[in-house]
Image (tube, rainbow, N blue to C red):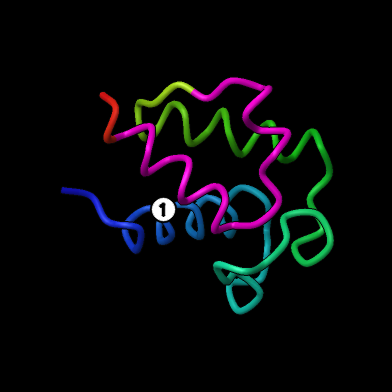
Amino acid sequence: MISQDDIFNKIKEVLVEEFEVESDNITLKANLFTDLELDSLDAIDLMVTLDKELEIEINTETMQDMRTIEDVCDFVLAAMQDE
């Protein structure tokens, strides 16, 4: 069973490797846009990467409501449990 910590670590890994975000800035409460300085295209790229690596389906409507790393973790965890 995958945990929120597992998902958080995967998101953190992607943010550091793909988007050059400082590891220390990535927390559950970190805002994707204000704290991590992602733009809307970066957010889409993040979701596409997670979609491929975690084999889940993420639609753009759902993505629009995500603001924090915790939002993304919660969504991914729910999507993985639905499969």
Is 62 inside the magenta-drawn segment? yes
Q: Which residue is mark 1?
A: 10
7 lies above or below 65: below
Q: Quadrant of the C terminus?
A: top left
Residue 36 in the image: state x and y as whole percent: 75, 62
* Count of numbered labels shown in the rendering: 1
Instruction: Tell me if mark 1 has few (under 14), some (14-19) or many (20+) residues whose alpha carbon lies within 10 angstroms of its own.
Output: some
Q: Residue at x 66, y 44 (%)?
A: 66
In what element is the residue under mark 1?
helix
Which residues make up the magenta segment? 58-80
Residue 80 shown left or right of residue 14 in the figure: left
54 lies above or below 74: above
Which residue occupies the extreme bottom position in the image? 24
Is 69 inside the magenta-drawn segment? yes
Residue 20 in the image: state x and y as whole percent: 68, 59
Magenta part, dominant SS: helix
Q: Residue at x 65, y 33 (%)?
A: 63
Q: Residue at x 68, y 51 (%)?
A: 19
Which residue is at the front of the view, 4 or 47? 4
Q: Amino acid at mark 1?
A: Lys
Examine the image and state in which quarter residue 82 appears.
top left
Which residue is at the front of the view, 52 or 71? 71
Residue 33 in the image: state x and y as whole percent: 80, 54
